[in-house]
Image (cartoon, rainbow, N blue to C red):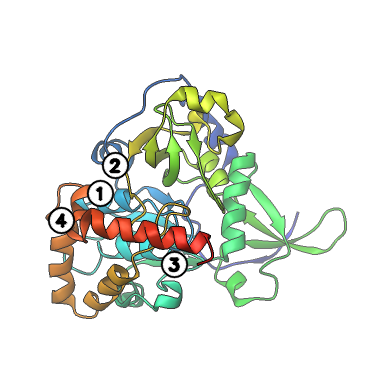
């Protein structure tokens, strides 16, 4: 097929299905115990320069504990999939522009900087406007399709989306003539992240996962990622998984690490578990306005704590989380 138009954005991940197949062919598929701490999972599976992707959507079901640990361990020069990334992108940007290195080097952007109705992240905006993070543009839909292409084992998928937009001009997609109809279609390349982190409701020690509510792109992301860290609200027996295998959303053979992290999406929302902590998110947005205040804020909540449990204890502890559980319960009761 002749290329009629090529977007000017850079491609930050290799879309080759042959090279991906060779990697996955060597990935262990044994039913082995994968339980470990978040610190160990990040140490083993997240490397400087990796292409990293997060599960969840907006502030819902985000793997906050993994993001905190990436900052604490000082990972550098990551490339990132900004697929409706709100607090997760805000967190990763905390590793840039503060004299502590450069956590982010490049981003595939669909939706970043904004925390939806909460407003824009002042520091994430500073980081992007500084020019130190390279950007390629996509839409939420086309970035999700890139994960789907990888999950399917094909190097690209055709789509009509992006045609006639400036987003196409700043993407790494290309336009071709369909060999069957002659119509113009956009080809979006497969995206195989080096490592991904997904927070789920329940998992067994082998990595079989259950998710309640919307999964967005996570099922494709789990199959596209070369290495996958799962954090879960609850670790459950494998016998429970076997009694109702239809509830397994992500199978064990996709997973490299299982970390039990109660309240692991905090301060984001965990559907059917707890509501987002809007007060604490506002504290983040407020602290970011002043660089020195933000440094102090990060020391208190990220760098001076040993783990994620100590973080949410500093944010009000169990009484605050019980209140967020009550809010989520009332929400789903329509009260």
Circle 4 sits in a helix, a strand or a loop, which is it?
helix
Marks 3 and 4, Cα distance to the nearest angstrom?
Answer: 28 Å
Mark 2 or mark 3, which is nearer the start of the sequence? 2
* Camera-nearest residue between 82 and 307: 307
Per the image, the residue denoted by label 3 is 135
Circle 2 sits in a helix, a strand or a loop, which is it?
helix
Marks 4 and 1, Cα distance to the nearest angstrom?
Answer: 9 Å
Q: Quadrant of the N terminus?
A: bottom right
Which label belongs to residue 42? 2
User: Viewer-nearest of labels 3 and 1?
Assistant: 1
Mark 1 or mark 4, which is nearer the start of the sequence? 1
Q: Is residue 258 above or below residue 302?
A: above
Circle 1 sits in a helix, a strand or a loop, which is it?
helix
Which label belongs to residue 303? 4
Q: Residue at x 33, y 38 (%)?
A: 260
Per the image, the residue denoted by label 1 is 69
Which label belongs to residue 196? none
* Camera-nearest residue between 308 and 320: 320
Q: Are marks 3 and 2 in contact (CB under 8 Å)?
A: no
Residue 301 position by quadrant: bottom left
Mark 2 or mark 1, which is nearer the start of the sequence? 2
Marks 2 and 4, Cα distance to the nearest angstrom?
Answer: 15 Å
Q: Where is residue 271 drawn, in percent x and y?
A: 47, 54
Could one spot residue 100 in this view of the protein?
no
């Amino acid at each position: 097929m002749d290329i009629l138009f090529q977007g000017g954005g850079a491609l930050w991940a290799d879309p080759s299905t042959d090279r991906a197949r060779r990697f996955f062919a060597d990935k262990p598929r044994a039913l082995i115990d994968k339980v470990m701490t978040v610190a160990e999972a990040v140490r083993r599976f997240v490397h400087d320069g990796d292409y990293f992707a997060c599960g969840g959507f907006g502030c819902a079901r985000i793997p906050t504990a993994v993001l905190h640990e990436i900052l604490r361990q000082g990972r550098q020069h990551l490339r990132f999939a900004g697929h409706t990334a709100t607090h997760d992108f805000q967190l990763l940007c905390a590793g840039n522009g503060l004299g502590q290195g450069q956590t982010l080097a490049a981003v595939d952007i669909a939706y970043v900087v904004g925390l939806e109705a909460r407003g824009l992240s002042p520091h994430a905006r500073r980081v992007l406007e500084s020019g130190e993070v390279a950007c390629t543009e996509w839409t939420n839909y086309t970035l999700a399709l890139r994960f789907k292409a990888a999950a399917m084992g094909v190097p690209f998928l055709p789509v009509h989306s992006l045609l006639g937009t400036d987003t196409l001009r700043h993407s790494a997609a290309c336009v071709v003539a369909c060999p069957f109809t002659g119509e113009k279609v956009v080809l979006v390349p497969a995206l195989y992240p080096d490592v991904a982190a997904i927070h789920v409701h329940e998992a067994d020690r082998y990595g079989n996962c259950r998710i309640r509510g919307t999964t967005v792109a996570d099922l494709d992301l789990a199959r596209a990622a070369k290495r996958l860290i799962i954090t879960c609200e609850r670790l459950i027996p494998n016998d429970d998984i076997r009694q109702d295998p239809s509830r397994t959303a992500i199978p064990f053979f996709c997973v490299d690490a299982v970390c039990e992290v109660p309240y692991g999406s905090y301060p984001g929302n965990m559907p059917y578990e707890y509501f987002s902590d809007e007060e604490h998110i506002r504290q983040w947005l407020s602290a970011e306005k002043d660089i020195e205040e933000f440094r102090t804020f990060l020391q208190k909540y990220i760098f001076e704590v040993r783990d994620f449990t100590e973080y949410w204890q500093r944010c009000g502890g169990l009484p605050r989380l019980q209140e967020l559980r009550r809010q989520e319960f009332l929400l789903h009761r329509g009260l």
